[in-house]
Amino acid sequence: MIEQIRETAKKLLTGGEVKVVIGYENGGLPQTTRPVFITSPDEVGRLVWNKHCYANVARFLVRKEVASLGKPAIIAKGCDVKAIVVQIQESQVKRENVVILGVTCQGVGEPPLSKCPICDVNTPREYDYLFGEKIPPRTDINKFADAEEFEKKSPKERWEFWEKQLSKCIKCYACRQVCPLCYCEVCIADKNQPQWIETSSHTRGNYHWNLIRAWHLSGRCIDCLECERACPVGIPLSLLNRRLAKSVKERFGYEPGYDKEAAPPLTDFKQQDPQEFIK
Amino acid sequence: MSSNNPETVSEREVQKKSGPIFKVLDARNLKALVQKGLELGCRVFAPVKDDKLVTFEQVSSPDQVLLDGITTRMSPKSVVLPRTEKVFSYKIRKGEIVVENKDDFVVPAIIFGCRPCDAASFPIMDRLFRWDYQDKFWNKRREATLIVSISCLDCDDACFCTSVGLAPDSTEGSDVLLTLISRDQYLAEIMTEKGAEFVEKTGLFDEAGADLDKSSATRAVRQKLGKKFDVEKIKPWLDENYGNKFWGEVTRMCIGCGICTYVCPTCHCFDLVDEAHYDGGAKIKNWDACQFAAFTVHASGHNPRPDQVSRHRQRIMHKYKYYPDNLGAILCTGCGRCVRHCPMEVNLIRILKGISEIETVCGTQR
Amino acid sequence: MQNDASTAYSNVIESGEDALDNIYLPHLMVIKEIVQETPDVKSMKLVFQDEEMQKNFSFRTGQFGEFTVFGVGESTFNICSSQTWKDHIECCFRKVGRVTSALWQMNEGDIIGFRGPYGNWYPVERMEGKNILFIAGGIALPPVRCMIWHALDMRTKFKNITILYGARTVADLVFKRELAQWANRDDVTIVTTVDPGGETPDWKGKVGLVPIVLKGMAPSSDNAIALVCGPPIMIKFTLPVLLELGFAKEDIITSLENRMKCGLGKCGRCNVGKVYVCKDGPIFTASQVALLPEEY
């Protein structure tokens, strides 16, 4: 499969159809890969595809250091493509301005990351080229199993859980920086007139940041788990995101990342939207 | 003169000049040291298991301590340089400002079970916090903190202390360094008066025979570490290559997440902010990172480091050129945390190795 | 090579008291007078709340301070008054961000904080006995104005004093009343200019960009030192004119600014290459600036 990917990348670069191919190369540490930006056809040999292609490279489509290189092709697995779909929905990326080299994927990590057994985009839902055998989407999975389990706890237990977890936060903002959908030029946390979110990593500052970020992602987060993978202190961020995603699914029947034509629920209104909050 | 006399700081260095005192510790008593520290009324910080990670935390019992990893996720620097701290507070009453400058923020602490790379970070950072102006927050916590480190007998691919002039059994920065020299015995090198005082109070150490030495115990790990790059070649290249396009090539995957800065034992740049409520507030000192876009942005919107390439270059330049130029030491101890925990595998070792292998010193922008 | 503490790099101050001072603690100052210079620039006269402090306070012309608005934050301003004035200090700022917007709302009699003086200062000894050419643009007059008054207060120590000051429009000129004072003196030559299109019907000064007006003035570089302060674009075009006129790079002095927090070399923010603007600056010669990487 990697040879085909390399050949396609070479063809796209030589033909001038794209200026850069975003993919993965071998990392310096064992069992790692590193995002790579191939601009010359001679360098396509650096591209790899394996169980350690963790990073959500869709992140780079909304970073100016990469956007400045020109029209990209991007080697993307299912979860990466879900991010690209949302980026297209939100007008951050034009569909015709990116060539998606979709790759079928049975999971990354050894053992597989927690998102992989409940993945239904083993075959990406959007692509220009597809590499690997098409895998039909799983239908027997419960994406919100852990959120459901968590909901069974009492409010007091849930509060204590998050109090403990969020006290670890060091405000490094890695969760924001790895997220392909955190692309605001100036994040609300960096604005200071007024200082909406305190920068200190004390209780108030930590709650503020993590809860605001979870809210800003509700209805948008595609559960790539990059935030959790990056978090240096091991906060289970995706649990928070998944609880909100479950709520959006239940109320609006919507899951982000599958249909680039769909209107995101928080920017759209349908007559049958639940309105029980209007008393 | 108060008891927190900084002259005791230079006394510490005088002790080092006359050489360490050697003692031995029964290996079964290792964790008992933690108990003794707690009994002395100190806060004890040691590696603990926290969900899935091993990191430095305050412990209340020796059973929480976990010492068999390569190193911890977060470094122990937060004991002396907290993530967030109040530097003074003030009350605003009817146009009057009353400033409160309290001095009660220090409780004696013991950093137990850190690695030599973590211990060595403290004397390096001392240089900055005493550069012309003395930072009392650093000085007072530093004075009240005892560092008992344990030599490494193993390493992983991210470790590179030997490449920056340190070693898995270096005593730099430790008050007491413990090296496991046999299955049931630690050799203790007591480097400072503070360390000697602690050792005596525990009553757990015995005299060491003259023939005991640590080098055979750590030979294997030193060989495994080898040298990842020639550090002598780094600064000469950095001196001449600010504008080299090499920077863009090796840092384009950096997403500016700041993890490298926050897990690093020597990164110390900080922010000063005011947090106010209806009748007053406080000036807060927080960890900050040159990797953040907002770090250098002017109020006018102008940013001298407008992209991630310039920001990541700044990190490497600061550690391997500016800090040596200004303060005489490399701002890095080779602990490898930045390499291990970077989500995009920017890999500092790769970059430094690349620099050390560039054949010619290329031209600069000037 | 690494960590040779025996070289005792640390400039450890052995005195116990200094080591225990809180270097981040501001002194309280009272706003004595506020003048609105332009639609978005104000200048302030400040005195220490503690009279003893005011009596004992001294600084060198060109240094800066960190000014606190309690509850909001700190901002870095040059002390735009001369060291020869003992009874107060002055600052001048544009309303552009969080702290300056809060400072804008303050009134005479309000309390702010001050930390300083920090940084280096104008090399006055080197300037004595020479002709001084002051060039400033827009909001960058204050860092030059302090040295202008210093030179005027010690007039006999300097030879010819020439001032060239320009702004985008007449309304943007700061310290207008002082420009008039200097124009009325016969021991100072002053030329003021506004950008083309910035003049008012009754404007009596020149019209033209500062570098162009400078070229027309063609001041002699003989035994002269130039002090230049302005927006980067102005410096970019003024420097070549000065070099053409024969000024040596060591004889062109400027005051840089950069984002600062601690102001005393610890927070790691204001460095340009290995040079810290708060410690090695803000006053630099053009030859020093030429060696700096372009990150300011």
Image (cartoon, coloured by chain):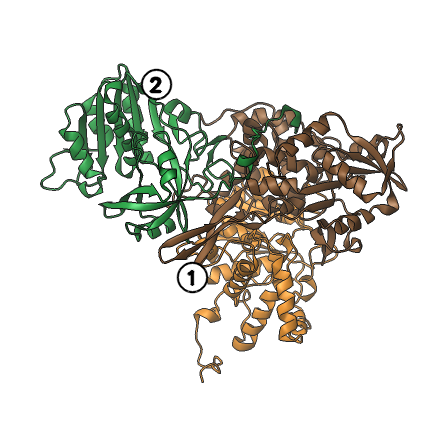
Q: Which chain is brown?
A: B
Q: Secondary structure at mark 1?
A: loop
Determine the colour of chain A. Answer: orange
Q: Is residue B73 left or right of residue B23?
A: left
Residue A115: image location, x then y, percent: 66, 62
Q: CA distance from mark 1 to mark 2?
A: 51 Å
Q: Amino acid at mark 1?
A: Tyr
Q: Secondary structure at mark 2?
A: helix
* Residue B18 visible here: yes
In the picture, the quarter occupied by the C terminus of chain C is top left
In the picture, the quarter occupied by the N terminus of chain C is top right
Question: Residue drawn 62% across and 74% down?
Answer: A155
Residue carrying label 1:
B278
> Which is more toward the observer, B203 or C256?
B203
Q: Amino acid at mark 2?
A: Arg
Q: Which mark is residue C126?
A: 2
